Image (spheres, rainbow, N blue to C red):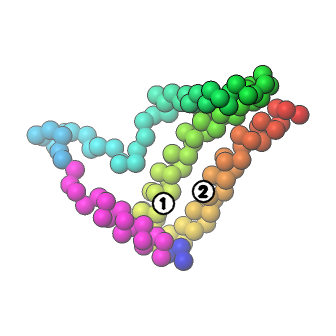
Amino acid sequence: MMQQQIVALQKQLQGATTTPIPIQSADDTATLPLHPMAYPPMAHLDYKPQATIITAERSMNKGQRYGDNSLKQLKYLLSAAYHPLDILSHELLTSEVHNPNLERYCDMLRDVRKLLLHLPSRCLDDSRS
C-alpha cells in the first residue's frame, strides 16, 4: 500500500517538474534556485494570527478573550513547524524510495504532526488548571 502511494506521488512530482528551470545569468556562476517547496529562514518569519471575528469577540468575557488569543497565537506559531516537516516528508518520498525504513520514517513524521496538532489545546488546558 505504501509503495503504491509512493509511486503515485512520484508520478505527480515528475509531471509537475518537467518544465526546465531558466538559467539566471549568462555564466554558470549563478546559484541554483531553491527547491520549489523551500521556505525562507526561520529568523525572517513573522507569524501574526488573524484577528478574531468581531461578533464572536464581543460575546466573550475577558478570560475567554485571553484564552482565545493565547490559543490562536500558539497554533499560528506552531504552523511554522509544519512546513519544514512537509518538506522533509517530500524529500524522503522522492529520494529515499528504496530505503527499507521509509515507512517507519513516515510513521514517525505523522506522529510528530499529531503531537504538534494537540499541543496548543493541551497548553491551554494546563494554563487553566
Check disc 2: other Cα within 10 Å, few if <14, some if 14-19, many if 20+.
some
Q: Amino acid at mark 2?
A: Leu
Q: Look at the numbered disc 1 and give the secondary structure of its residue.
A: helix
Residue type highlighted by circle 1: Leu
Q: Quadrant of the C terminus?
A: top right
**Which element is circle 2 on?**
helix
Confirm or deny contact between disc 2 and disc 1 (CB under 8 A): yes
Residue under the point 82% across and 32% down: 127
* 73 sits to left or right of 37: right
Cα separation between marks 2 and 1: 11 Å
Location of residue 76 with respect to 66 vertically, above or below = below
State the image coordinates of residue 107 (x, y, percent, origin top left): 62, 63
| 117 in the magenta segment | no
Question: Visible in this render: residue 43?
Answer: no
Give the crowd class for mark 1: few <14, some 14-19, many >=20 residues within 10 Å: some
Q: Write the residue at 36% across / 62% down.
A: 13
Tell me where the magenta segment starts and ends, as one range. 4-21
What predominant SS class does the magenta segment belong to? helix
Tell me the number on the disc at residue 69.
Answer: none
* Of the pair 71 and 82, the residue shown nearer to us: 71
Whole-percent x, y for residue 9 in the image: 42, 66
The residue sitting at 35% across, 48% down in the picture is: 36
Q: Is residue 15 in view? A: yes
Q: Which residue corresponds to mark 1?
A: 92
Q: Nearer the viewer, residue 49 or 120?
A: 49
Q: Residue furthest right?
A: 129
| Residue 74, position as x, y percentages in the image | 66, 34
Mark 2 = which residue?
A: 109
